[in-house]
Image (tube, rainbow, N blue to C red):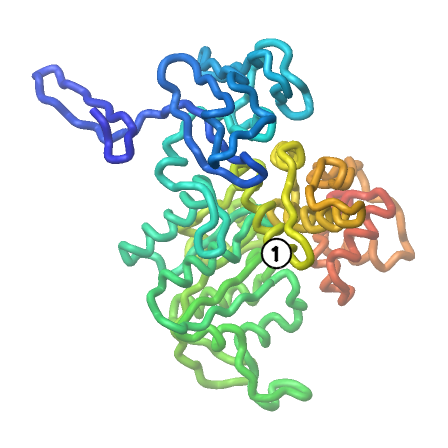
Amino acid sequence: MTGPLGASTVTAVSSDGETIARARAAKVPGLVLIFADQRPAARIFRLKGTAIELGRLELAVSDTLDPSISRAHASFVFHRGGWVVKDLDSRNGTFVGSSRVDQETPVATGTTVRLGGALVLATLDVTPFEQHGLGIQEGLVGGPALRAALDAIAVGESVGMVSSLMIAGESGTGKELAAKAFHALGGKPNAPFAAVNCATIPKDLAERLLFGSRRGAFSGATDAPGHVQAAHGGTLFLDEVAELPLDVQSKLLRMLETREVLRLGATHYEQVDVRVCGATWRNLREEVSAGRFREDLYFRIGQPEVRLPPLRERREEVPWHIQHVLDDCRHDRPFSASAAFVDACASRHWPGNVRELRSEVRRAAAAAAARGSDVLVVEDLSATAGAPIERPTAVATAPAFPHDEMAAALTAECGNVVGAARRLGIHRNKVRRWLERHGVDAEAFKAR
């Protein structure tokens, strides 16, 4: 049988002859063309049989055939649940990473393979690409992994069960974009969207900034609304919500339960109509276990949770992000990227995810322009672009800096960088730079 999206369905027959139709889509191995003719692409090659052979005609995306691709360029064989690529004596070679294929070479799922000026992604299942698509929609770059996460938000909203949402994911994965998608599904035209980065709020100002204040509450206090009031009728997005102090977490929980807020210095509660979307890169369950996040707040705001996968799990998006940036760089000349440049980007770790990639592409475009070219090549990438960040190895005890206020703050906050920064009234990046300069891991201060 064939499902509505071309995926196979499985039919089971019970012992008494009754047929039970299972709408369970079978995985379909295949390849996805993600870059060709110096542009992002999205073409699916389903496995039919045991192998897929690609060449100039199969990889053509325009009327002009790419001369860097041979007529019969490479063969991909699906064997024992994985892919094996073989170059078919092509003129310009087949590459996995920076290595040219000279014999049958296993290819891990999610790996890009370069055939002349084209890039294909090997995958064990092409059905997510068929279901969710790949490209730019309404200014948002997205592939199957990201679209599936956003669809999960839409499904919860459609059944009217979502008044709060938690978005988990590394820095730079697009958590605010997901929060805005959650907000847009609220169905209220022109409703406010108030975004707050909780990691940047000074600890002693958190309550006032979130809930507002009344004149006379403290020296110099005025009647001022907080972020909650600013989001009335719409959505309050609390990025890095796990960084909120515990006493403020309790007030946030009360606001969620009662839909009332008490300004600092006030005696009467105000009614508010606010949907809350939280985001964090931390594991909230571990934070609850460690006593850094309230258990009752976790069960109120921590579910449902949508995880945004890191860019290294969304390699198919890389060409589209690159092109999106290059389109914005078209001031004096149009820029394009070579297949080798895109392949190098798709193969890297990108600890800063989309934010880091886009920043590096802008820098690479400037480097290309400086050498008088409008085509980005691998050499335009900096040596550290997309490289994993090596963390200093933790030691058993913290180093002794008895007269250093940074060490004292880290000790007082048990190695919490954000807490130490708040205590000193500085940005957390200054604390991180201090740690790097001394070759110390923040975890070391937990043992002091």
**Location of residue 387 in the rendering, given as x and y in whole percent from the top left corner:** 71, 37
Residue 173 point in image, percent of width and height: 56, 48
Residue 143, horizontal then vertical, whole percent: 46, 42
The percent coordinates of residue 51 (x first, y second) are 43, 14
Amino acid at pointer 1? Asp
Taking the image as shown, residue 79 lies to the left or right of residue 151, namely right
Q: Which residue is mark 1?
A: 328
- Residue 225, compared with residue 6, is above or below; it is below
Q: Is residue 339 left or right of residue 134?
A: right
At x 72%, y 64%, the residue is 422
Q: Answer with left or right where residue 356 lies relative to residue 410.
A: left
- What SS does tag 1 mark? helix
Answer above or below: position of 288 versus 2.
Answer: below
Q: Give the residue furthest to the front.
A: 64
What crowding class fits label 1: few (fewer than 14 Cα within 10 Å), some (14-19), or many (20 or more)? few
Could you say which is closer to the camera, residue 165 or residue 244? 165
